[in-house]
Amino acid sequence: MFFRKMGFVGSALLLSGGLALAADLPQTVYVEPIEPAPLPPAGFYASLHAGYVMPGDVDGEIVFPAAPSTRNISVDVEDGYRFGGALGYDFNSMIGIEAEVSYFEMDVDSISVAGPAPGGVTAPTSGDASVLTLMGNVIVGQQYDRWRPYVGVGAGAARVDLDITIPALPNNLHDNDWAFAGQAFVGLDYSLTDTVSLGARYRYLHIASTDYADEAPDPVSIDSFGTHSIEAAVKVKFGG
């Protein structure tokens, strides 16, 4: 009987010691797993953008049939502004397509014409160059919580209007032409709500060569050129 009582007391002591040791151990805290942000539903959207345009070098040629001779020209174009909009469809947060219309305008300060004399002739001008683009774009991105970085490419057509007055010469230039246009852009959107987002993007636009005639009329051609743009954008989704 004595040994049975001692065994019972020992077991009780071991059990109480084990419980005390377990109480001293750090408690396991359950943490809910972080689930990835769900993909927004597929659906149509509309977007608006506006920004600042910085043109690259604008060069070309002018033909004087009476001479006859062909002279290289260089057009001094100021930075300008652009705005436009798009209607598109997001298949999910990763890929979408859109049709885009955009317009931008830049002042023209002068035209330099190469000639026999060193340096040629530079004639001050007044007027502007405006560009209307009709583009189809493909956009690829990835959703990270409320942020969505993306890249895009597009192709279409550009109408380039030249409305240039040269006070020192009779051959002013008021003409337009259509050309192929291609672009690439990269941007970042932030979702304010499930349907509205704000963003910023950089865009490079390439416009193929165009042909005109001044008032003389002398044929004028402008080589292909590019523009760089920094833009702000707002996007509104309409659902599926």
Image: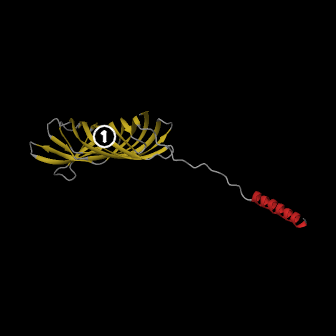
Horizontal arrangement in the rendering, residue 178 relative to residue 202 (left or right): left
Q: Is residue 28 above or below residue 90?
A: below
Q: Which residue is mark 1?
A: 136
Q: Is residue 84 visible?
A: no
User: Callout 1: few (<14), some (14-19), or many (20+) C-alpha neighbours within 10 Å?
Assistant: some
Q: Quadrant of the N terminus?
A: bottom right
Callout 1 secondary element: strand
**Residue 152 horizontal/vertical position (percent):** 36, 46
Count of numbered circles on the image: 1
Horizontal arrangement in the rendering, residue 223 relative to residue 92 (left or right): left
Colouring used for the render: secondary structure
**Foreground residue, 49 or 192?**
192
Mark 1 residue type: Gly
Q: Tell me where residue 82 sits by quadrant.
A: top left
**Which residue extends farthest top?**
238
Please tell me which residue is depicted at 39% across the width and 37% down the height of the picture: 49
**Foreground residue, 61 or 186?**
186
**Residue 45 horizontal/vertical position (percent):** 40, 35
Q: Is residue 33 above or below residue 6?
A: above
**Foreground residue, 3 or 168?**
3
**Residue 33 horizontal/vertical position (percent):** 58, 49
Q: Tell me where residue 176 sits by quadrant.
A: top left
Q: Is residue 31 visible?
A: yes
**Which residue extends farthest right?**
2
Horizontal arrangement in the rendering, residue 35 relative to residue 119 (left or right): right
**Residue 115 horizontal/vertical position (percent):** 17, 50
Q: Quadrant of the C terminus?
A: top left
**Which residue extends farthest bottom?**
3
